C-alpha cells in the first residue's frame, strides 16, 4: 500500500541557505535509512516569507521518515540540524502533520 504524507517544520531566521547546503550534502547513511523506511519520493519546500518548510513524501507500506526517531544516525542528523530549525527536547524537528484536503489525479 502506498501512503502520502505531508508535514510542516520551521527554520530559524537566516538559516535557509545553510539548510539547503546541508541537504545537498545529506549523509548517505541518512538517505539510506529513509529509503529503507519505504520512502521513495520525498521533497521539502520553503516558504521564504515565513521560514516554514513543507515536506511531502510517498512511501511503500505504512512507515516513513517520521518513524525513524530511534535510529542512531537519524539522531545524529537531528543534532547536526538543530541549530537551524525549531526542535523538540530530543533535537527532532518540530513536525506538524498536515491533512490532505484536495488531490487531483
Image (cartoon, grey):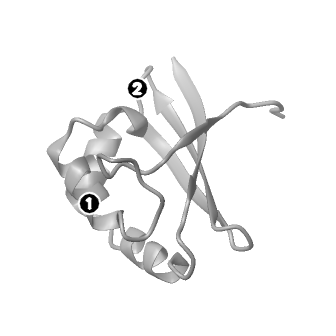
Q: Helix, strand or loop at disc 2? A: loop
Residue under the image location 51 percent in, 82 percent down:
17
Seen in the picture, residue 70 relative to 52 is either above or below; the reply is above
| Outermost top residue | 1
| Outermost left residue | 72
Count of labels in the image: 2
Judged by depth in the image, the label closer to the viewer, 1 or 2, is: 1
> Residue beneath label 2, please?
63
Point out the image quarter for the C terminus: top right
Q: Position of residue 8 (x, y in %)?
A: 60, 48
Q: Are marks 1 and 2 in contact (CB under 8 Å)?
A: no
Q: Quadrant of residue 21?
A: bottom left
Q: Nearer the viewer, residue 24 or 75?
A: 75
Residue under the image location 26 percent in, 60 percent down:
79
Name the N-terminal-most of marks 1 and 2: 2
Left-right relation of 66 to 75? right
Amino acid at each position: 500500500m502506498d501512503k502520502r504524507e505531508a508535514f510542516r517544520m520551521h527554520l530559524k531566521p537566516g538559516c535557509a541557505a545553510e539548510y539547503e547546503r546541508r541537504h545537498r550534502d545529506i549523509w548517505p547513511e541518512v538517505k539510506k535509512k529513509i529509503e529503507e523506511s519505504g520512502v521513495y519520493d520525498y521533497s521539502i519546500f520553503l516558504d521564504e516569507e515565513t521560514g516554514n518548510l513543507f515536506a511531502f513524501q510517498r512511501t511503500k507500506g505504512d512507515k516513513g521518515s517520521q518513524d525513524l526517531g530511534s535510529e542512531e544516525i537519524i539522531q545524529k542528523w537531528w543534532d547536526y540540524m538543530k541549530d537551524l530549525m525549531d526542535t523538540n527536547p530530543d533535537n527532532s524537528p518540530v513536525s506538524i502533520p498536515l491533512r490532505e484536503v484536495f488531490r487531483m489525479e
